Image (cartoon, coloured by chain):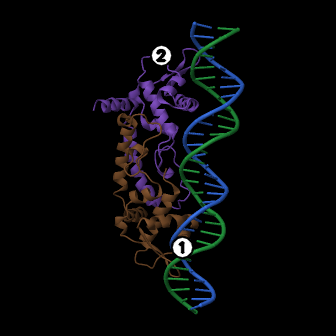
Chain colours: A purple, B brown, C blue, D green
Amino acid sequence: MLSKKTKYAIKALVVLGKNMDQPPMQISRIAELERIPKKFLEQILLDLRNAGFLYSKKGAGGGYSLNRDPKEIFLVSIMRITDGPIAMVPCASLNFYHKCDECHQESTCGIRDVFVDVRDATLKILSETSIADIIKRESTLISV
Amino acid sequence: MLSKKTKYAIKALVVLGKNMDQPPMQISRIAELERIPKKFLEQILLDLRNAGFLYSKKGAGGGYSLNRDPKEIFLVSIMRITDGPIAMVPCASLNFYHKCDECHQESTCGIRDVFVDVRDATLKILSETSIADIIKRESTLISV
DNA sequence: GATTTTTTCGAGTAATATTATAGATTATAT
DNA sequence: ATATAATCTATAATATTACTCGAAAAAATC
């Protein structure tokens, strides 16, 4: 399951992606627009900022804005920040690998073998899909 | 993340799939072989039995055995029993659909749109892979 | 038919992770 | 100086996961 944290992160980035040429947007404004608990969003934006995706400015007229082209912010990166691994088993993770507790013989584990395939299929989609794509998909869906 | 419940379920089914022409195997034997907490495994096997995948027999000489050809038991079915939905968002689930708490406009949600694709990719693999395939993969991995 | 073996059933609990909140601090603009 | 808004640290509330307990029911064997 995708955590609320990740959903909120994506939603916030989408809002900021639509706000590219505007002055920075405040946490409270994003929280209001997307109905995200403000204090929770605060933490999430901070994580995204620390990962380099956001620019932030304190004080009056401050707020958050994207630090990169929305075309260059991929879901896979966001998810790794907010949820951690993409793979469904730790032993199949590229960025967060560790042995499964239950596993006796990783090299011959058939479960791992299947879930490496699942990871690859998921990864392909998530690393091809950007915030810009999400925005595009939404406008396409509206016009249909 | 795949729950331990699901991993244990798959492991138990694999053990039983290798035991096809033998008399039924006891919970305690499976638990021992796969190092699964016995009482936990008990619940899991009961779920699989109630779903029609296992045959069970009480009393001395009783135990569990597969009720179907291991080629016809697919990971997708097991996971739906033990973990529920395959999709990462409830609104993209085929068998466990429900609205996301946070969602205001499902029909135009770009997140949903992407995760329907992820679901399809995952589903393809999981509904093509059977217990027999897991067993086959393991023996292939051993011989490499 | 008593005893042993083994599944079945219902409930309960412990551990962990997720989601959210609170309050004080720091930086910036006016 | 004052108001604004991000940052930081801690903690509370809730949900989920992973298990555990004890007793009942069914079947085999002596």
User: How far is disc 1 from disc 2 in space, using C-alphas?
Assistant: 66 Å
Q: Which mark is residue A23?
A: 2
| Residue B105 visible in the snapshot | yes
Residue drawn at the location 40% of the way across and 50% of the way down:
A118
User: In the rendered image of this protein, does residue A64 appear above or below residue A112?
Assistant: above
User: In the rendered image of this protein, does residue B66 appear above or below residue B6?
Assistant: below
Is label 2 in a helix, a strand or a loop?
Answer: loop
Residue A132 drawn at (x, y percent): 37, 29
Task: Tell me the chain of label 2.
Answer: A
Query: In this rendering, which labeled residue sits more in front, label 1 or label 2?
Result: 2
Residue D5 drawn at (x, y percent): 57, 20
Instruction: Give the labeled residue for mark 1.
Output: B29
Quadrant position of residue B134: bottom left
Mark 1, residues whose alpha carbon is within 10 Å: few (<14), some, or many (≥20)?
Answer: few
Mark 2, residues whose alpha carbon is within 10 Å: few (<14), some, or many (≥20)?
Answer: few
Q: Considering depth in this image, is A105 or C13 the residue closer to the camera?
A: C13
- What amino acid is at disc 2? Pro
Q: Considering depth in this image, is B135 or B130 the residue closer to the camera?
A: B130
User: In the rendered image of this protein, does residue C10 appear above or below residue B110?
Assistant: below
Q: Quadrant of the C terminus of chain A?
A: top left
Quadrant position of residue A50: top right
Residue B5 drawn at (x, y percent): 51, 59
Residue drawn at the location 49% of the way across and 19% of the way down:
A24
Q: Considering depth in this image, is D4 or B98 the residue closer to the camera?
A: B98
Is label 1 in a helix, a strand or a loop?
Answer: helix
